[in-house]
Image (tube, rainbow, N blue to C red):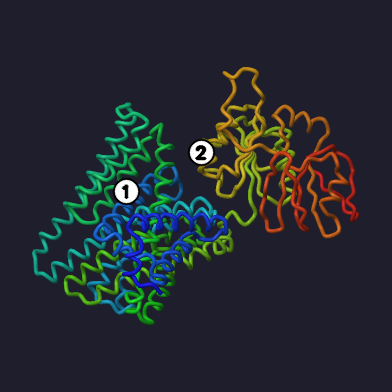
Amino acid sequence: MATAETAAGLLDPVLAFALVGALGVGSQWLAWRLRLPAIVLMLAAGLIVGPVLGILDPPAQFGDMLSPMIAIAVAIILFEGGLTLDFHSLSDAAKGVRRLVFIGAPLGWLASASALHYVAGLSWESSAVFGGIMIVTGPTVIAPLLRQAKLARRPAALLQWEAIVNDPVGALAAVLAFEVVVVLQTASGAGEAVMDLLVGIAVASALGLAAGWGLAQAFKRGFVPEYMKVPVLFVVLLAVFAVSDSVLHESGLLAVTLMGLWIANAGLPSFTELYRFKEHATVLLVSGVFILLAAGMSFERLMVLDWRALVFVLAVVLIARPLPVLIALAFTNVPLKERLLVAFTGPRGVVLVAVAGLFGERLAGLGIADGERVAPLAFVLVAATVVLHGFTLTPFARFLGLSAGEKPGVLIVGSSGWSVALAKALAKMELPVIIADTNHARLRLAREAGVPVFSGDILSEVAEERVELMAFEKIIAASENDAYNTLVATDLAPEFGRENVYQLKRVKQTSTRHALPATLGGRPLALEQTFMEANAQIAGGHEFRVSTLSEEWTLENWRETLPEAVAVAELTPGGRLRFLKPGETPQDKPGTKILSVGVARAERQGNGEAVEAAG
């Protein structure tokens, strides 16, 4: 096994930096392909290249720059978290969020500190500081878990808001506890310490809100050109974090969160572009920080832990997390199932490890011996909770009936005879489906067919509140307006993935001045039909059919039975729905369901079973 010194000599900082990026992004991509929690793979990758193989040793390769790098990355991650806190998304979860912050956080601090002292065996000084940090549940972990689990809107909002709001709260709680410890250890003035804390919080709040307001006004009034908005945003963000942190350590996290919160609710026309860029940057930063923190954890530091660490993790997962949440949400309109889901979902992330490592060193510097155990305990807690919730949140949510389930749903935008026929066929495949249209009258046919509908613009804020978008994996823009279809597909592609957004073929324009760019819009369907052509075909007697392949009845038999049919989509035995590209052939695998469209007539399969028809 290579030593840290050898690795540091082999990899210069540039190569080490490139390795961190490759491992982080590679872990995220592999997690997407394998449908595994990305955080788990990133932790594993960091441990393998760090303490196991000795290829990466962040303290040796990055030196004094490591701590500022992680601090700035955490600040940007929290700012991006603040950008997601749109007050419109709170709706009926507002009361629950307030209780989680004002009641749940203090109770969580007390419960965590008690677990640290009585179970992990830390002193009250270390327990009070580390217990404050443990309020943090980690938006860096919650966000990918929510995407994976496809939770219902309210429990997802509760977890997301709690994670982002409590991040700076937890850091400031640790600062408060540390200031008290410093007073007790150095016999300095308690009044002075309290005053420093209050001034720091006031400065951080004022800086964050003022910067958010100033940027919003500058962007709205056109004082900053479009191409400079993101650079200006980054510069102001770094300045606010640095100035606030110089007044009171860790208060910069509060400042940047408030700054992001203000911008998120300022109604900026260019907000979507700003947020998407920040989201992409955050993916890189989260990956990098997790790899660095995992690689920097040595076996020697972990060996200071004993059996109490395992019991401590169990106490946190089963008592210190659920009890404060259940008390905070008691006597609210949040249903019991949602309370249980929130109570037993508390993964910790980047902020906890980064801040705990910092305060652990400072506690040790004050002569508190067990301060050296804070960082290893934090790492074990993060690793255990990330792995636990990464693999259990989705099945637990399904068990409680708070998840979209395993079957991929389809959202069809635009009501017509064709879209209703398609929706009925998808329903026969037992897939969730909904039709959205801005015209209430056009939805009559869908309602009469028993298809769920949404009357309104699918791009509106009301749609975000009333439609469980997480329940749907595929989008088909099929209205009579090609420009609107293109807008819907282009706008929803970043959220659902461009590979999951489709639209009907656009009418070919004779003049280039009326033609929409080919780079905009969704993927083509196998039909290659415009709105008029598709609906004329259904009106002329065509219908959608659902056929199931078997060992006896193969794809060749299907083609012989339905020679004129066009395969539109396939549902694999594993439950994966895939809309086919023009000219693409379905897979010949027993159990595969083929959705096709063709002339309506009575057909019989070779094994004597009738081909299901819908439409």
* Point 13% across, 56% down: residue: 195
The local secondary structure at tag 1 comes to helix
Nearer-the-camera pick, 96 or 300: 300
* Point 34% across, 44% down: residue: 261
Residue 62, horizontal then vertical, whole percent: 29, 59
Which mark is drawn over residue 414?
none
- The N terminus: image quadrant: bottom left
**Extreme residue in the front direction:** 10
Going by the numbered disc 1, the residue's amino acid type is Thr
Q: Is residue 3 rendered to the left or right of residue 178? A: right
Bin the neighbour count of mark 1 within 10 Å (Cα to Cα): few under 14, some 14-19, many 20 and up: many
Residue 83, horizontal then vertical, whole percent: 38, 44
Q: In this rendering, is residue 6 above or below 405?
A: below
Q: Quadrant of residue 3?
A: bottom left
Q: Which residue is mark 1?
A: 257
The local secondary structure at tag 2 comes to helix
Front disc: 1 or 2: 1
Do the residues bearing badges 1 and 2 touch, measured as CB atoms within 8 Å? no
Q: Is residue 96 visible?
A: yes
Could you tell me how many numbered marks the image carries? 2
Q: Is residue 421 rendered to the left or right of residue 468? A: right
Residue 127, horizontal then vertical, whole percent: 27, 72
- The C terminus: image quadrant: top right
Q: Is residue 593 rendered to the left or right of residue 56? A: right
Bin the neighbour count of mark 2 within 10 Å (Cα to Cα): few under 14, some 14-19, many 20 and up: few
Q: Quadrant of residue 449?
A: top right
Residue 155, horizontal then vertical, whole percent: 48, 55
Going by the numbered disc 2, the residue's amino acid type is Val
- The span from disc 1 to disc 2 (Cα, nearest Å) is 26 Å
Q: Which residue is mark 2?
A: 462
